[in-house]
């Protein structure tokens, strides 16, 4: 009985399995066929730009350092005690042209001027006296010459009369002696005149020397005051009232508050391009940007000169540009690290495209009927996120600017800007009201 019972249970289980298998087979055989979806080509959403042909000059961007256009270190030209100091004579202080910066005790120098004036007055008086004696001696010479002429005429008459026996030999000899005496008197007067004239020359030289002494004394007196040679900012100072300064002591260092320049270096290639473009870099406009935190402050400038030597350590040519600081909202300071940008060579008849539209080996892609078409171009220059190119391109063509790793000929793309323009505008409340109004108008 047990064997029969077990056999019956096995037959029931087998029947169930066979029924399940047959049912599953029937379901599979009667399953309706599902329609297959066609394979769709993938389309890439991209951004494009329209090509424009033109003359472009990219910007060269380098870094430089500002410096004062004029700076001077004032030194004491005389020694003495400092008696007065400008109230703003401190590092960073502003002074105006002509301001008194430092005054030195004037007492000794005023005394030197007084003494020089007295000596000069005494010398001028001696010169007048010597010139008077010269005039007197000139008159004496004239009188002596007149007396000599009278004696010579008297001798001539006596020599004429001796032939007639009207005068004796003794009389003629007396006349000759008188002429000799008159000649001697003339010579003496001429010698005296020469001596007096020499004294005048000597006294004139003395006067000139004393005039120079007076001028020097006045100059030393003027040098007791140091004045600002131009509108300036104080860099360093070493003067306080009561301090004794010696000749050639450094007192104050200044730099011009309105004359600044920037020094920067261009590579040999960049410098050569600028020369090839215009023949010179002098006068080329420059923009100088000083970043104060996140705030850029820009100053206009122009290249004023080229460095004396090639900056071999920095690998290029140093240029110096004069900065126009007239209307600056933030005054410049020497030593500021700034960004310098200036126009590069002008590339005629070229295209300016985004860097993302330029693929390796000089390839760009033009969109034709929503498909990519490769074109070969030549890269000319980089311009702050853009590239200047020439090649197989036409103005007005649509250029791919989105970076696609799978980019290639025939790739299907969808311009998101065009799609946005062509998409229907959703109706809001105003649109619904307008539609309802139109329906009401039609009904009437």
Image: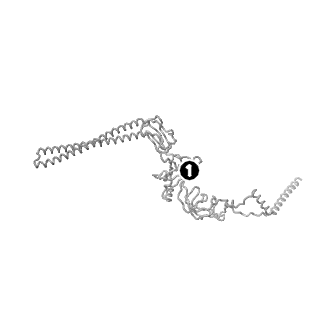
248 relative to 42, above or below: above
Residue 236 screen position, x and y as percent: 49, 41
Q: Residue furthest right?
A: 1
Q: Which residue is mark 1?
A: 298
Q: Is residue 37 visible from the viewing direction of this image?
A: yes
Residue shown at 10%/49% (left/top)? 164
Residue 48 screen position, x and y as percent: 64, 60
Residue shown at 78%/60% (left/top)? 437
Q: Helix, strand, or loop for circle 1?
A: strand
Quadrant position of residue 366? bottom right
Query: Going by the image, does 438 lie left or right of 188?
Result: right
Residue 413 screen position, x and y as percent: 66, 62
Q: Residue furthest top?
A: 242
Query: Going by the image, does 17 lie left or right of 176?
Result: right
Residue sitting nearer the eye, 130 or 418 = 130
Residue sitting nearer the eye, 86 or 47 = 86
Residue shown at 52%/58% (left/top)? 345
Query: Going by the image, does 157 lie left or right of 218?
Result: left
115 relative to 383, above or below: above
């Amino acid at each position: 009985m047990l064997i029969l019972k077990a056999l019956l249970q096995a037959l029931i289980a087998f029947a169930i399995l066979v029924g399940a298998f047959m049912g599953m087979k029937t379901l599979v055989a009667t399953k309706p066929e599902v329609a297959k979806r066609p394979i769709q080509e993938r389309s890439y959403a991209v951004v494009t730009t329209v090509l424009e042909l033109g003359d472009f000059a990219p910007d060269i961007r380098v870094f430089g350092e500002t410096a004062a256009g004029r700076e001077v270190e004032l030194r004491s030209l005389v020694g003495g005690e400092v008696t007065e100091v400008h109230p703003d004579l401190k590092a960073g202080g502003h002074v105006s042209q002509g301001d008194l910066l430092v005054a030195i005790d004037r007492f000794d120098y005023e005394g030197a001027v007084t003494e020089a004036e007295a000596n000069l007055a005494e010398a001028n008086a001696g010169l007048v006296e010597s010139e008077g004696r010269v005039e007197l001696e000139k008159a004496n010479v004239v009188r002596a010459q007149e007396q000599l002429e009278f004696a010579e005429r008297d001798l001539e008459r006596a020599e004429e009369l001796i032939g007639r026996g009207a005068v004796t030999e003794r009389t003629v000899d007396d006349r000759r002696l008188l002429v000799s005496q008159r000649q001697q008197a003339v010579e003496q007067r001429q010698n005296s005149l020469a001596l007096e004239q020499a004294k005048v020359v000597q006294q004139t030289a003395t006067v000139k020397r004393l005039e120079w002494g007076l001028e020097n004394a006045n100059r030393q007196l003027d040098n007791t005051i140091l004045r600002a040679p131009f509108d300036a900012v104080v860099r360093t100072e070493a003067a306080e009232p009561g301090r004794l300064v010696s000749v050639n002591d450094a007192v104050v260092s200044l730099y011009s508050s309105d004359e600044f320049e920037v020094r920067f270096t261009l590579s040999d290639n960049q410098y050569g391009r600028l020369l090839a473009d215009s023949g010179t870099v002098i006068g080329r406009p420059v923009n100088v940007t000083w970043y104060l935190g996140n705030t850029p402050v820009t100053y206009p400038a122009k290249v004023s000169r080229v460095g004396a030597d090639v900056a071999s350590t920095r690998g290029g040519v140093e240029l110096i540009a004069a900065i126009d600081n007239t209307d600056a909202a933030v005054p410049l300071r020497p030593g500021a690290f700034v960004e310098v940008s200036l126009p590069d060579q002008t590339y005629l008849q070229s295209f300016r495209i985004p860097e993302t539209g330029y693929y390796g080996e000089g390839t760009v892609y033009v969109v034709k009927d929503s498909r990519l078409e490769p074109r070969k171009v030549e890269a000319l220059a980089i311009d702050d996120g853009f590239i200047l190119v020439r090649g197989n391109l036409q103005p007005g063509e649509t250029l791919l600017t989105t970076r696609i790793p799978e980019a290639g000929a025939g790739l299907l793309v969808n311009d998101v800007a065009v799609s946005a323009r062509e998409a229907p505008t959703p109706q809001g409340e105003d649109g619904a009201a307008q539609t309802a109004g139109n329906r009401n108008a039609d009904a009437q």
